[in-house]
Amino acid sequence: MTITYEYEDALYVNLTNRCNCNCEFCLRHGKAQGSIYTEDSLWLEHEPSRQEAMDSFLSRDVCSYREIVFCGYGEPTYRLDDILWLVDQLKARFGDKLPPVRINTNGHANLILGRDVCPELKGRIDTVSISLNAVTAREYVALCHPVQGEAAYQAMLDFARECKQYVPHVILTIVDKDKSPEEIQTCKDIAQKLGVTLRIRSFIDS
Ligand code: SF4
């Protein structure tokens, strides 16, 4: 099974396959050959322990990467405590040489973990990249199917706003597919209102 993998000069970390959403575009639905995102190995036999994850890091030249990205083939913040433990260990070992650390998330950590985790990110996480995906709660539910329903949309926006206090770079992302120019403009307005960056990603047809 694949715990860490290289993608575009960054080191990606896959600690969980759990997710509270079931997005229409989720790469986990992919069937195409030849993409890391459709490799069976990203389906974990078991969630790696902290030590298994650390061993996977240390089997690599950690400081040679452009960035470390906790991503998952699932929602990584289910393992947030373990992510922060790993970052602390890596920072203790590599200090300033450690590449910047990013979490790619659906922004539901506070809902999932039942506490406000944003302060815990300070000094540990350099970038939080949050999937915005839709311009209304109703569209969000239709696209992402969060188990928490429409409340998940506002929770995601609140998470982005609060992360700004603790994390240097907070990014909202949308996939360009099926987005009208008007919707993209609305996404830009949402990001501006929250004081965060909007990144428009290309759809990966997996
Ligand atoms: S939040 Fe991410 S992992 Fe979860 S279903 Fe959506 S795209 Fe897939």
Image (cartoon, grey):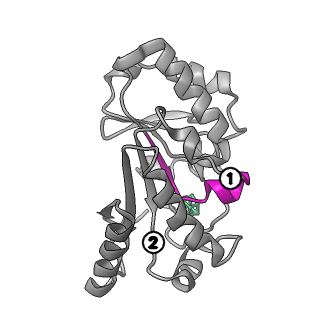
| Cα–Cα gap, marks 1 and 2 | 19 Å
Residue 18 is marked as: 1
Residue 205: x %, y % from top left: 39, 66
Residue that appears at 65% across and 41% down: 79
Quadrant of the rendering where the C terminus is positioned: bottom left
The segment highlighted magenta reads 102-114
SS class of the residue under badge 1?
loop
Against 56, residue 191 (above or below) is: below
User: What is the three-letter code of the residue carrying label 1?
Assistant: Arg
Q: Quadrant of ligand 1?
A: bottom right
Within 10 Å of disc 1 (Cα), the crowding (few <14, some 14-19, many 20+) is: some
**Residue 93: image x %, image y %?**
48, 12
Q: Earlier in the sequence, mark 1 or mark 2?
A: 1
Q: Is mark 2 within 8 Å of ligand 1?
A: no
Q: Residues within 10 Å of mark 2 (few under 14, many from 20)?
A: many
Q: Are marks 1 and 2 in contact (CB under 8 Å)?
A: no
Of residues 78 and 111, the one drawn nearer to the viewer in this rendering: 111
Residue 111, quarter of picture: bottom right
Residue 111: in magenta span: yes
Per the image, the residue denoted by label 2 is 133
Number of numbered markers? 2
